[in-house]
Image: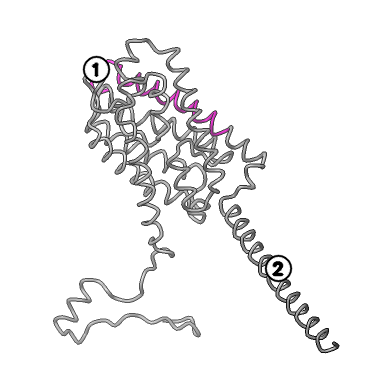
């Protein structure tokens, strides 16, 4: 009997050990799942949804985008509608001046995005979290709608029809026969956005160079890049219904929602082109040099190469620096 009891006790102990091991395994699995979920939320930056500062910055983006859409679009329409010999040439100067002012004001407050393009690339490069990026893009789209609501309330009906409420017509499937084909507009949006990212963002997201140049010069570089590509696009292909490259997917959202109809045709171009440009630029930026260019010591120019090829024994050897004696 004692042996039977001992066997039963042994079996019970084994069962308890097995149950305990199973519970520990479940707890470990739950902990890993919880840890991975927490890590994912941390990578996205979900904590910023509860940050008042983030919402203040998003409100800044909304107001800034609405103001930018109003001032920039009305200025471009005014330039195109002027009686000058070539009104298109004045648009880049208007773009530079307005963009520079808005960047100077908003960069210290929210980062000065005012466009999903800069928000996309900032999120890709880890400058801001994906959570903040999602709220920024929503604020920029709402700001665009508000800006064009104001424009529609003050602009004449004739100008609205002529310039498609901001120049977002694609292929001219509207009252006017203006506009570009979707393929041409896509190439322009992609190439011009990439140029702005390469020229402006490469400087703006470099902490060392930003510190060296200062806020004003960095804003001038970004605004100058924007003015440059607007100049290229509007002088080559600018028409009444197409006011040059957008560089801002939210820019044509307001006109498409408020006017509808033909403005929805080809609207995807203003999102697809910049997103492709952001993706390619991000991959390209990963392979940029990590250090500044270093000037080599010695004679490595064409003359030295020629001396070596001709076998000149009197060629000058590269100078060597003696770090201990501080002499050549």
Which segment did they paint magenta? 60-87
Residue at left 26%, top 15%? 175
Q: Is residue 102 left or right of residue 298?
A: right
Q: Is residue 264 above or below residue 186?
A: above
Indicate the secondary structure of the residue bearing disc 2. helix
* Location of residue 263 in the rendering, given as x and y in whole percent from the top left corner: 33, 24
| Residue extending furthest toward the bottom | 3
Q: Residue furthest top?
A: 157
Please tell me which residue lies in front, 299 or 208: 208
| Quarter containing the N terminus | bottom right
| Quadrant placement of the C terminus | bottom left
Residue 132, above or below 185: below
- The rendered magenta stretch, by its main secondary structure, is classed as helix
Specify whether residue 78 is painted magenta: yes
> Quarter-wise, where is residue 306 in the image?
bottom left
State yes or no: residue 190 in magenta: no
> What is the number of the mark on residue 29?
none
User: Which x, y percent locates residue 242?
Assistant: 28, 26
12 lies left or right of 140: right
Residue 155 at x, y percent in the picture? 40, 13
Quick check: 324 left or right of 197?
right
In depth, the one of 88 and 128 nearer the eye is 128
The local crowd at label 2, few if under 14, some if 14 to 19, many if 20 or more residues have their Cα within 10 Å, is few
Q: Which residue position holds label 2?
A: 23
Residue at left offset 53%, top offset 33%: 139
- Numbered badge on residue 176: 1
Q: Position of residue 274 (x, y in %)?
A: 36, 42
Q: Is residue 303 in view from this perspective? A: yes
Counting other residues with Cα less than 10 Å from the Cα at mark 1, is it few (<14), some (14-19), or many (20 or more)?
Answer: some
Query: Residue at position x 30%, y 17% from top?
Result: 81
């Amino acid at each position: 009997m004692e042996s039977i009891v001992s066997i039963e006790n042994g079996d019970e102990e084994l069962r308890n050990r097995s149950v305990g091991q199973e519970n520990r395994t479940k707890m470990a699995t739950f902990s890993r799942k919880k840890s991975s979920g927490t890590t994912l939320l941390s990578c996205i930056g979900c904590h910023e949804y509860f940050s008042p500062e983030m919402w203040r910055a998003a409100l800044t983006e909304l107001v800034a985008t609405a103001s930018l859409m109003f001032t920039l679009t009305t200025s471009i329409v005014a330039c195109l509608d002027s009686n000058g010999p070539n009104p298109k040439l004045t648009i880049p100067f208007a773009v530079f001046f307005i963009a520079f002012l808005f960047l100077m004001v908003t960069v210290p407050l929210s980062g000065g995005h005012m466009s999903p393009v800069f928000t996309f690339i900032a999120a890709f490069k880890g400058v801001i979290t994906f959570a903040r990026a999602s709220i920024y893009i929503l604020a920029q789209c709402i700001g665009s709608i508000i800006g064009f609501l104001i424009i529609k309330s003050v602009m004449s009906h004739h100008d609205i029809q002529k310039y498609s409420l901001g120049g977002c017509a694609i292929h001219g499937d509207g009252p006017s026969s203006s506009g570009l084909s979707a393929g041409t507009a896509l190439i322009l949006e992609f190439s011009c956005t990439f140029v702005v990212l390469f020229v402006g963002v490469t400087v703006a997201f470099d902490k060392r160079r930003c510190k060296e140049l200062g806020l004003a010069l960095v804003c001038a570089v970004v605004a100058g890049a924007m003015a440059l590509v607007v100049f290229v696009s509007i002088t080559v292909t600018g028409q009444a219904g197409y006011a040059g490259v957008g560089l801002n997917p939210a820019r044509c959202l307001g006109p498409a929602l408020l006017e509808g109809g033909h403005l929805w045709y080809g609207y995807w171009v203003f999102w697809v082109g910049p997103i492709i440009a952001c993706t390619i630029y991000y991959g390209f930026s990963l392979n940029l040099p990590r250090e500044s260019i270093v000037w080599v010591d010695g004679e490595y120019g064409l003359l030295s190469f020629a001396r070596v090829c001709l076998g000149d024994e009197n060629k000058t050897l590269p100078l060597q620096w003696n770090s201990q004696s501080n002499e050549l």
